Amino acid sequence: MIPNTSSPKDKLTTPRAAAIAGIIFSILMITSLVLIWLSVPFDPQEDGGWLAANGSMVSLALNLVPFAGIAFLWFIGVVRDRLGQAEDRLFATVFLGSGLLFLAMLFVSTAMAGGTIRMYGMAPGQLIDSDLYTFGRIVTNEIMNVYTLKMAGVFMLTTCTLSLRTRILPRWMVFLGFILALFLLLSLGLVNWAPLVFPLWILLISVHILLANFKRTKNQDVNLTSQDNL
């Protein structure tokens, strides 16, 4: 049996690390989505005129996604560590699986979009005149706005369920997460701003975790100071 050598100070770094990772993911993801939203027509059957005008901006947005994915992986790992022994195996499996599937779908859609932009740079006329452009737009839109959002919704449902059982989040924030998760599951990719819901919710809970951690640390410092004075 391995002895537990972690100190109270080490335990306090866990929620702080989760909060920082969640905030980094949210900022990068929101920035990427907004850049794409402003640059790319929502209708996948639109012509490719936006490629010449906004291709560089979309490329910048796509290059932010891998870093957002790394931060999200860190967020998942730290949250699981935070749950510790209170983690339910069933919900923990769905939590981890939906998070990894969300990242996989996100990366696939990003790669499809990036490949389309690269093909346009090599042969602009041939890409627009062929069916490859339409195929790339439709597949990217389908993966991102249907499958990726569904996995984000499942991740939110399991996170809220685990938070409700372990009380690591306020009840109002948990119920808000349930409502937003159902919205993502039922949106069917028909609302163009729907992908913003997930990173905004992650940002909300990450800021809460960070503030709660600072408050807990401050209270412990005050208690230690009081004990020293005694």
Image: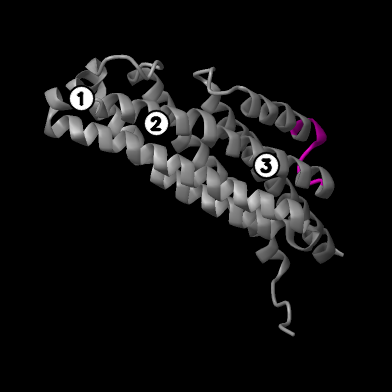
Percent coordinates x, y for residue 67 in the rendering? 41, 46
Q: Earlier in the sequence, mark 2 or mark 3?
A: 2
Q: Residue at x 53, y 52 (%)?
A: 73
Q: Which residue is mark 2?
A: 139
Q: Position of residue 205 (x, y in %)?
A: 66, 38
Q: Amino acid at mark 1?
A: Ser
Residue toward you, 85 or 154: 154
| Residue 59 percent location from the top left of the image | 28, 33
Quick check: 123 left or right of 148?
A: left
Furthest-bottom residue in this view: 1
Quadrant for the N terminus, please. bottom right
Q: Mark 2 is on which residue type?
A: Val
Residue 9, how many percent across, how many down? 68, 64
Mark 1 or 3, closer to the camera: 1
- Residues under numbered marks 1 and 3 in contact, where contact means CB atoms less than 8 Å apart: no
Residue lying at the far front in this picture: please name it.
Answer: 131
224 to 101, vertically: above or below: below
Q: In the drawing, does residue 224 fall left or right of residue 68?
A: right
For label 1, the crowd category at 10 Å Cα-Cα, with few meaning under 14, some 14 to 19 and many 20 or more, is few
Q: Which residue: 68% across, 47% down?
A: 214
Residue at point 77% right, 47% down? 162
Looking at the image, how many numbered discs can be counted on the residues?
Answer: 3
The mark nearer the N terminus, 1 or 3, is: 1
